[in-house]
Image (spheres, helix red, strand yellow):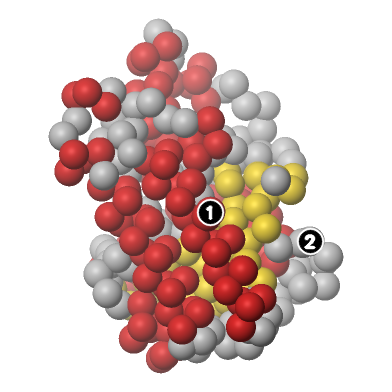
Amino acid sequence: MAIHFQNALIIGAGRGTGHALALKLADGGTNVTAVARTAGDVEKLGAKHANISIHVGDGASGIANELMKQINPDLLVLAGGITPKMSSFQEQDWESFSATWNSDTKTTFDFLKAAVEMPMAPKGTIVTVSSGAAISGSMLSGGYAGAKRMQHYLTNYTARESDRLGLELRCFTVYPKQFIAGTQTADIASNAYAAAQGVSQDAFMGQWDAQLTPELLADRMIELVDPTAGYAPGAWGVTGSAMEQMT
C-alpha cells in the first residue's frame, strides 16, 4: 500500500486505531509524530519504529498551536478520545455527561482552528475519527453521541473555510459504524449494552459478521486518504466488511 505523506501528526496514538495507523504510516516512510496522554503507551509505540517521534500530552490541553507549528504536518489525524461513563443520562451529573465534549470535541476544535489559522501545510489532509454513535445515538454514554457529531460538523466547517481561504485542505470524517474490537472503549461499551439487552458480550459483538479491528480501520483510512485512489473528501462510514460515503 503506497503512502503519500511526509509528516503525519496523530492525536490519540497511544492505543487502538491511532497506534495501528502510526505504525502503518511509519512503515510506509512517513515521519510520524504520535501524541497520547499516557506516557507508557506512546513510549512503547515510539520504541517500535525509527520513523515515530512521540509527544506526551492531552490534545484538549492547549497544545495544538505548538505542535502544528513544530510539525507542519501534511496529514493530521484526530483519533484520540476518552471512554465515557456508561449509564443512563439521569444517573450522570453534568461533568460526566459533558466529558466527551471537553476532551474529544475540544481537541478537534483546537487542532482544526490551528489548521485554518496557521495554516496547515498547503493541500494537507485532515482525518477526524468520529463514532457510529453520532449517527444513531448512544443512550448509555451521556453526551458522547452529540460530541462525536460535533466533530463531523467542525470538520465540515474546516473544509468550507479551506475553500474560502484557498487552502486546498482535504477534510475527511471517518465513522466506525460498529464497535472497534479489542479497544478499551469497545470492551466497556459493549459490556454495558449487552447487559442492557440481557445478552452476553460475545453475543452482542457477534451481531456483526466481520469484526472491525484497529488494524483494519487504519488500513481503510490509509486507502481513503490516498490522493491517487479517488475517494472524495467528506464523511465515510466504515464497518468490518465495507466502506461507504455518507451524506
Position of residue 106 relative to residue 65, above or below, is above
- Res. 231 image quadrant: bottom right
Where is residue 162 shown, x and y percent of the image?
Answer: 61, 76
Determine whether, in the image, residue 74 is placed left or right of residue 244.
left
**Numbered badge on residue 69:** none
Position of residue 9 relative to residue 188, above or below, is below
SS for tag 1?
helix
Q: Residue at x 50, y 40 (%)?
A: 134
Task: Name the residue that disc number 1 marks.
Answer: 152
Determine whether, in the image, residue 150 is placed left or right of residue 89.
right
Name the foreground residue: 91 vs 163.
163
Can residue 28 be seen in the rendering of this structure?
Answer: no
Name the foreground residue: 118 vs 59.
118
Where is residue 40 shown, x and y percent of the image?
Answer: 27, 65
Identity of the amino acid at label 1? His
Q: Residue at x 46, y 84 (%)?
A: 117
**Numbered badge on residue 231:** 2
Identity of the amino acid at label 2? Tyr
Name the foreground residue: 199 vs 95.
95
View extreme (bottom): residue: 70
Can residue 171 be seen in the rendering of this structure?
Answer: yes
SS for tag 2?
loop
Where is residue 224 shown, x and y percent of the image?
Answer: 72, 61
Q: Residue at x 39, y 47 (%)?
A: 147
